[in-house]
Amino acid sequence: MTLRTSALVAAAAASALLAGARALAADPPAHPPPTSASGDVMVGLCDGRTSLELKGVKDASQVTPEQARAVADLLMEDWKKKNPEARWDPPPAGAKVAQASQASQASQASQPARPGAKPPTSSSGAAEVKKEQGANAQSGHTYGSFSERDQAIWRASTEQFVKEGHRVFHDAKAMGGTVAISCDMCHPDASNTHPETYPKYQVQLGRVALLRDMINWCIQNPVRGKPLADDDPRLRAMEAYIYAQRKGAPLEYGKH
């Protein structure tokens, strides 16, 4: 490689780094659906192009989950017809979180409440064990020296956190949506989310993105809500749920 070629490569790399830094600093581009001439509610997919008008519906807050489901199905059908060669993966074969969550909730609902007991939360597992059994939540060292009980607490806490992510993923209101569209309507059981491929360049954002960036983009655009802060429990739980659904998939960051 000549000195001139080396200089050109270095200049191109520097330019790319500068452009990337500017993209990170800027607000992500929004892709609102087109405006209806009659003032009806418009719903769009995350491709920023496919949209559908809800005839006669003027107030987005009045869209029912049933209407949203029908709209999402029609939008996905339209998108797949327009993109027959595009890869769209079905729900993962190991998608068991929904059934496990429903069974767990049903079991909890059938149990009589103990006096003074608090309802479980996505982060209460280890603390509740410590409080109720009067023992340390962790008896061993963090790395390499822990008991079976430690592991049981960690597994229970993690599963509870993933189940909370499943709940939010399937609840438009929980994630702040305004058109009753929830993430599962286009991504059943977190299908076609491919968390193992992040970080990667996302066309919608115009930059390299983490999984949580894309979750927020979808909340802001198809779901028509406000992006969640990085430390928002809902965002963290949804991220955990999506990763859990791809357990066992090899890490391939940057893959499309």
Image: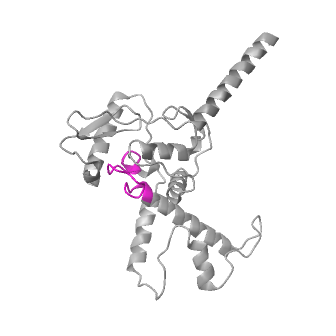
Rendered position, 254 above or below 229: above
Image coordinates of residue 105 in percent, x first then y, are 42, 71
Image coordinates of residue 26 in percent, x first then y, are 56, 36
Q: Nearer the viewer, residue 180 or 194?
A: 180
Is 68 on the left-hand or right-hand side of 114? left
Residue at the far left in the pictured view: 56
Q: Residue at x 29, y 52 (%)?
A: 61
Is 227 on the left-hand or right-hand side of 65? right
Q: Is 120 included in the stretch rendered in magenta?
A: no
| Residue 19 visible within the image | yes
Rendered position, 236 above or below 160: above
Residue at the far right in the pictured view: 3
Q: Nearer the viewer, residue 79 or 178?
A: 178
Residue at the far bottom in the pictured view: 115
Write the start and end of the magenta stretch as one range.
Answer: 168-187
Quadrant placement of the C terminus: top right
Quadrant placement of the N terminus: top right
